[in-house]
Image: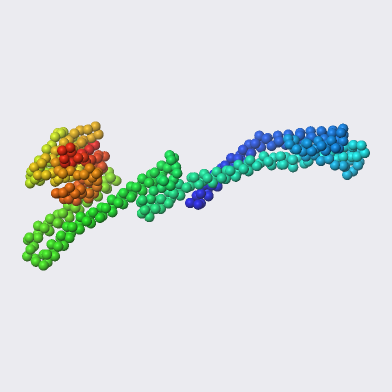
Amino acid sequence: MQKLFLNAFIMIWLAIACSLVGVLLVAYVSRATPYEEELLQRQSDFALTAAAGMLENSGPVAAREFIAVAGSPPLDVGLELTEAPDPNACVGSDNTGRERFIAVGATCYRLAADDLEQSLFSRLLPRSIPWVSAIIAAALAAFWLARYLTHPVQEIKIGLRALAEGRFSTRIGDRIDRKRDEIAGLAYDFDLTAERLEEFQDVQRRLFHDVSHELRSPLARLQVAISLLKKNPARMEAMADRLEREITRIDDLVEEILTLAKLNASEQLPLQRQTVDIIDLIADIIDDCRFESLTKNVTISYDGLSSSVATVNGELIYRAIENVIRNAVKYSPPSSEVAVAAIRRIDGLEIRVQDSGPGIPREHLKSIFRPFERVDTGGESQLGFGLGLSIAQRALHVHGGDIRADLNDNGGLSVVLRIPL
C-alpha cells in the first residue's frame, strides 16, 4: 500500500510540476523573457546616458548622487563611477558603449553599467520565488491528494483481509469519510456484503445447532429402545411401533432439510417451471387435509377463484401452500374452522389462510419464517420441526413472491401468500 501511495504522490506531483513548466515554456515562446531583457537594456542605457550627462555638466558628486538613486527601485540599474586608471583613456573615446570615459577638468573618469545578464538574473530571481513556492505547494497538494485517494483503498484492503479471515462483523463505512462519491458507494457495498455474510454465517451456525438438536432427541430414544431390547428381546413387538415412529421422524426431518437446501440452491439456478392451475393445487391440498383433520373435527372452507393458471414450479408452490394449511389445521382447536381464500390482485394471486388457534405474540410474526423457529403457545405449538413456514417462504421467494403473517381480530393467525402470475 505504501508503494501505491508513493506512485500516486509522484504521478500527481509530476502532473502539477509539468503544468507549471508548460506555463513557463509558453511564456518563453511568447517572448516574455526577451521583452524583459529589452526593457532592462533601455533602462540601463537611459541611466548610463543620464549619468554621463550629469558627470559632464554637474561634476562627479552630482553624478554619484544620481547613480545612488538609479540603483534603487524602480530602476534598479547598477552604475559604477571611478577614476580611469589610464588618464589618456578619455582621448578619442566615443562614449557610446556600456563603458564610457569622460574627462572632467584634468581628471578622466570611467563610468560603466553592471553586466546585463547579472542584472537580469537579480531582477528575475525574486520573480522565481512564486514558482518555487508553487512547486512546493504542488508537492503538498499532491501528498494530500494521494493520501485522500489511497486511504479508502487501504481501508478496503484491511476489510477484505478481515473477511478472508472469517471476521464478517468488519465494517469500513464509518472509517471512510466520503459522503456521496463512488468510493463511498464501494464502502457501502462492502458493508452490505459483510452484513450478508455475517447473516449467512449466523444462519449456518444456527442451522447446524438446530439440526443436531432435532436429531439428538429421536436418536437418543432409539438408543434407549435398543438398549431395552438387548436386555429383554421379548419386548420387540411392543417396541416396534416406538422404533418406527422415531425412524419416521428422522426421515421427515431429513426430507425437510433437503427441501430447504434445494430451495436455497434454486436461488442460484434457473427455476424449472410448468403451467399449472394453482386453484387445483389448493383443492387437492384441502381434500387431503380434510381427511387428516377428521379426528379433530376441524373443518376447512374455501372461498374465491375457481381457476388461476400460472407458470411456476408446481412442486414448490404445492409444498408452500400445503405447509401453511397444515400448520393452520395443526394449531386450530377441535371443532374449529380453517378458512382459505384466493383473490386475484394487481401484483399476483393472493392466498389467505386463517385459523382459530391461540395465535402468537406480535413480536414473533416475522421470526416464525426462520428455520427451526417455533413459538411456545402451549398445547401442540412445539410439534414439528419449525421448517414448514421457512420452506414456504423460500419457495415463494424463488418465484418472486412473498409471505406474511398477521393476527386475526377474533383470535388466531392469518397467513397471506402472494404468487406472481
At 16% from the left and 62% from the top, the residue drawn is 223
Q: Is 218 situated left or right of 73 in this image?
A: left
Outermost residue on the right side: it is 106
Q: Residue at x 41, y 42 (%)?
A: 185
Q: Nearer the viewer, residue 157 or 130?
A: 130
Tell me if 88 is positioned left or right of 48 in this view.
Answer: right
**To which quarter of the image does residue 341 belong?**
top left
Specify whether 287 is left or right of 9.
Answer: left
- Identify the colour scheme used: rainbow
Front in this rendered view, residue 91 or 156: 156
- Percent position of residue 379, x then y: 14, 49
On the picture, is 243 further left or further right than 147? left
How far from the left and from the top, in percent, is residue 403?
Answer: 23, 40
- Residue 310 is situated, as x and y percent measured from the top left of the image, at 21, 36
Q: Quadrant of residue 363?
A: top left
Give the quadrant of the C terminus: top left
Residue 137 percent location from the top left of the image: 58, 43
**Viewer-closest of 276 and 153:** 153
Residue located 55% across and 47% down the image: 10
Residue 275 shows in the view: no
**In the figure, 33 relative to 163: above or below?**
above
